Amino acid sequence: MLKEFLESNKKCFKLVCGAGNECAEDVEKLVSLYSSAGAEIFDICAKPEILSAAKKGLEKAGIYDNRFICVSVGMKGDPHIFKAGIDEKKCVSCGKCEEVCPNDAIACPKINRSRCIGCGKCKNVCPNASIDMYECDVDLNIVLPKLVEMGIDCVELHATSEFDEDIWEKWEIINNCFDGVVSICIDRLNLGNKQVLDRLKKMISIRKPYSTIIQADGIPMSGSNDDYKTTLQAVAMAEIIQDANLPVYILISGGTNSKTSELAKMCDIRCSGIAVGSYARKIVKPYIEADFSKALELAKKLVDVSKL
Ligand code: SF4
Ligand code: SF4
């Protein structure tokens, strides 16, 4: 069980497949690869077909001890539940959006919505303002019971937006429907330090001590580069949570890479693990189809260095 694993004080590696990544084929391959490489937790979007794909990935890797699936639930205003859309009338076919997309979701002027993770990079580079982001939320009352029935180990709520009402509504549904370890992913894009801690204290007040993970998110979906600067905010956010002495487990995310564990150590952050998304997916992307051994070697190197 995930709780027992966290209690063991072993440091874990969480692969973030992307709360917005709805490409089943992609998720199956990533889960299989990173499970073989030693990752313990797999973060996927809250969709039954993606949960089935992640389970297939775990089966393919054939390792069943200490492997856990976490489904991520986005909020109103949370970038993880956005999808990009191109206005074809405005598009001048310059190809810039295709170049920056980290998940090969664009074949201009079309966007493959199942691959879009809502990072907004395409929108930022478009010279003709042809791209907009659209919110795609799920009905948690319908989807969560189905996921619980299929078997999950953790539910993660992205509690970062300024829409309090939506957070409390979803928090209540999660706590009523699921009695395992719950994760709260939170960053400071909309909230200050005090608001972050006030929100967390209120949220965990209805839970048993050490039944909650706080995923301290630096800058969501920003970890493509492998340097200290990219991971600085992730470690800083973990420090804020650590200093508050809450009865929770801390994972570091949002701008994580191969330097995160080292920087966290230098800053005396004691976390239960590192969650890596953009960077973990980026390093294996050129090899995952063509050269599995090479992809595995790179994934294993990242997993190992993250557990130091
Ligand atoms: S760049 Fe990001 S937001 Fe744009 S299509 Fe690709 S994944 Fe989606
Ligand atoms: S960046 Fe904008 S204008 Fe260029 S191809 Fe993409 S959508 Fe079209």
Image (cartoon, helix red, strand yellow):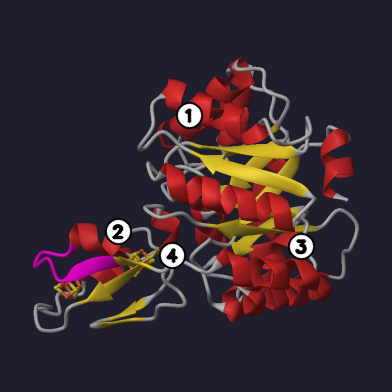
Looking at the image, in which quadrant does ligand 1 appear?
A: bottom left
Q: CA distance from mark 3 to mark 4?
A: 22 Å
Image quadrant for the C terminus?
top right
Residues at discs 3 and 4 in contact (Cβ within 8 Å): no
Q: CA distance from mark 4 to mark 2?
A: 10 Å
Residues at discs 2 and 1 in contact (Cβ within 8 Å): no
Q: Nearer the viewer, mark 2 or mark 1?
A: 1
Q: Is residue 226 magenta?
A: no
Dot 2 or dot 3: first in sequence order is: 2
Q: CA distance from mark 1 to mark 4?
A: 24 Å
Looking at the rendering, which quadrant does residue 26 occupy? Answer: bottom right
The residue type indicated by label 1 comes to: Val
Q: What residue is shown with label 3?
A: 152
The magenta span reads: 126-133
Horizontal side, residue 270 vs residue 123: left or right: right
Tell me where residue 244 appears, x and y as whole percent: 60, 17
The kind of secondary structure the magenta stretch mainly shows is: loop
What secondary structure is marked by label 2? helix
The residue carrying mark 4 has its beta carbon less than 8 Å from ligand 1: yes
Dot 3 or dot 4: first in sequence order is: 4
Disc 4 packing (10 Å; few <14; some 14–19; many ≥20): many
> Is residue 142 among the parts visible in the rendering?
yes
Disc 3 packing (10 Å; few <14; some 14–19; many ≥20): some
The residue carrying mark 2 has its beta carbon less than 8 Å from ligand 1: yes
Horizontal side, residue 82 vs residue 67: left or right: left
Give the number of the disc on residue 196. Answer: 1
* Front position in the image: 299 or 190: 190
Tell me where residue 143 appears, x and y as whole percent: 62, 71
Q: What residue is shown with label 2?
A: 121
